[in-house]
Image: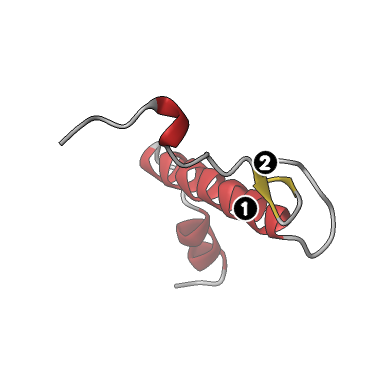
Amino acid sequence: MEPRSSTDLPTIATEYNGSDRNAFLFGWTPQAELWNGRFAMIGFIAYLLWDLAGYSVLRDVLHLIGY
């Protein structure tokens, strides 16, 4: 089997829906959904680290309402 030259390789998708897939676009766009997912992952990790540090929003709320 002969190796393929670099010009025969498929191109990397740099655009998504006619725009850069990492563009920070407002509105109901596929790019907004990508950013929403990224921010959700950051928030989830931040909360886990906050909880591991000994602070817990859930525990504090339950303590405030008497459970």
Residue lying furthest right in this view?
A: 26
Q: Which percent across, then down, holds residue 10?
A: 46, 42
Question: Is 55 drawn above or below residue 4 in the view shown?
Answer: below
Q: Give the residue at the far left of this rendering.
A: 1
**Left or right: where 40 falls relative to 5:** right
Q: Which mark is residue 34?
A: 1
User: Which x, y percent locates residue 63?
Assistant: 49, 63
Instruction: Please say if the residues under marks 1 and 2 sit with CB atoms less than 8 Å apart.
Output: yes
| Spot occupied by residue 27 in the image (x, y as percentages of width and height) | 84, 60
- Check the image and report above or below for 27 versus 56: below
Q: CA distance from mark 1 to mark 2?
A: 8 Å
Q: Residue 33: image x %, image y %?
A: 66, 59
**Residue at position x 42%, y 39% in the image:** 49
Q: Residues within 10 Å of mark 1 (few under 14, many from 20)?
A: some
16 vs 59, nearest the viewer: 16
Query: Residue at 20% of width from left, 32% of height from top?
Result: 2
Q: Is residue 31 left or right of residue 51?
A: right
* Amino acid under disc 1: Leu
Q: Mark 2 belongs to which amino acid? A: Asn
Q: Which residue is mark 2?
A: 22
Q: Nearer the viewer, residue 49 or 25?
A: 25
Compared with 2, 21 (above or below) is below
